[in-house]
């Protein structure tokens, strides 16, 4: 009696894992833009020049200067990761191998014919590779704010809107510029 539920439940769990893998692969190319603000005691021009030099060094180029919003936009190209493409392909290979094994046990007449499903595993790496290389924007807004009630001391507020990974890479550099995260 118990044996009759093992294979169908294993098949169902394997299908659920395939659905999860599908959403994991799709999320690997999702845009993860965040906004973060930093304070600095340096003047606006100095902060902007330092951040501009940093972004230029990282192969970003100035694409827009919006005086109304007081915002500067830089653009660069994000390169896909070879390691992540290989990892996603390996995950897909493992998942299709497991699915083909379960299907070959459920339908013994076809047997190992289901192993042909493993041929679709490079699609995961290809999908990531095609979608991950995209233009990336970094938007900067630099403004002065009064740090004392009298307004004699001012600080510079730097607002960065960029991809989460770019903000993470920018943190150590901004600390060396004297920019303090809140």
Image (spheres, helix red, strand yellow):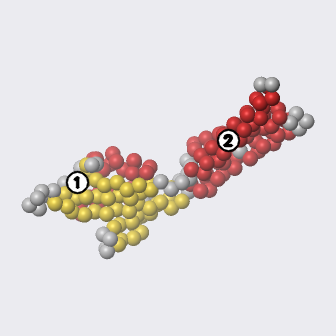
Q: How many marks?
A: 2
Q: Position of residue 56 (x, y in %)?
A: 38, 59
Q: Residue at x 56, y 57 (%)?
A: 133
- Of callouts 1 and 2, which one flags the residue occurring earlier in the amino acid sequence? 2
Q: Judging from the image, what secondary structure is the residue with disc 1 in? A: strand
Q: What distance separates the C-alpha of mark 1 from that of mark 2?
A: 49 Å
Q: Judging from the image, what secondary structure is the residue with disc 2 in? A: helix
Q: Residue at x 28, y 53 (%)?
A: 38
Q: Which mark is residue 16?
A: 2
Residue 19 in sight: yes
Q: Position of residue 7 (x, y in %)?
A: 78, 32
> In this view, which residue lies farthest toward the bottom?
68
Q: Position of residue 181 (x, y in %)?
A: 28, 48
Q: Residue at x 59, y 46 (%)?
A: 24
Q: Position of residue 88 (x, y in %)?
A: 62, 43
Q: From the viewer's perspective, is 132 left or right of 47?
A: right
Q: Is residue 101 above or below residue 76?
A: above
Name the foreground residue: 46 vs 114. Answer: 114
Q: From the viewer's perspective, is 85 left or right of 147?
A: right
Q: Residue at x 73, y 33 (%)?
A: 10
Tell me whether the residue at label 1 lies in contact with that at label 2, contact meaning CB atoms closer than 8 angstroms.
no
Q: Nearer the viewer, mark 1 or mark 2?
A: 2
> In this view, which residue lies farthest toward the right?
109
Report the quarter where the N terminus lies: top right
Name the foreground residue: 179 vs 31. Answer: 31
Residue under circle 1? 40
> In this view, which residue lies farthest toward the top?
2
């Amino acid at each position: 009696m118990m044996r009759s539920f093992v294979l169908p439940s294993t098949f169902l769990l394997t299908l659920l894992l395939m659905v999860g893998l599908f959403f994991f692969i799709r999320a690997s190319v999702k845009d993860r833009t965040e906004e973060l603000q930093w304070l600095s005691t340096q003047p606006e021009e100095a902060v902007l020049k330092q951040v501009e030099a940093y972004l230029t060094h990282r192969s970003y180029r100035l694409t827009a200067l919006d005086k109304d919003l007081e915002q500067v936009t830089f653009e660069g190209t994000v390169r896909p990761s070879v390691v992540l493409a290989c990892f996603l392909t390996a995950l897909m290979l493992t998942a299709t191998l497991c699915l083909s094994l379960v299907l070959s046990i459920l339908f013994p007449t076809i047997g190992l014919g289901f192993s042909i499903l493993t041929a679709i595993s490079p699609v995961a790496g290809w999908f990531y590779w095609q979608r991950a290389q995209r233009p990336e924007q970094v938007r900067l807004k630099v403004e002065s704010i009064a740090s004392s009630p009298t307004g004699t001391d001012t600080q510079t507020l730097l607002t960065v809107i960029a991809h989460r990974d770019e903000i993470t890479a920018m943190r150590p550099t901004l600390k060396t510029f004297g920019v303090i995260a809140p």
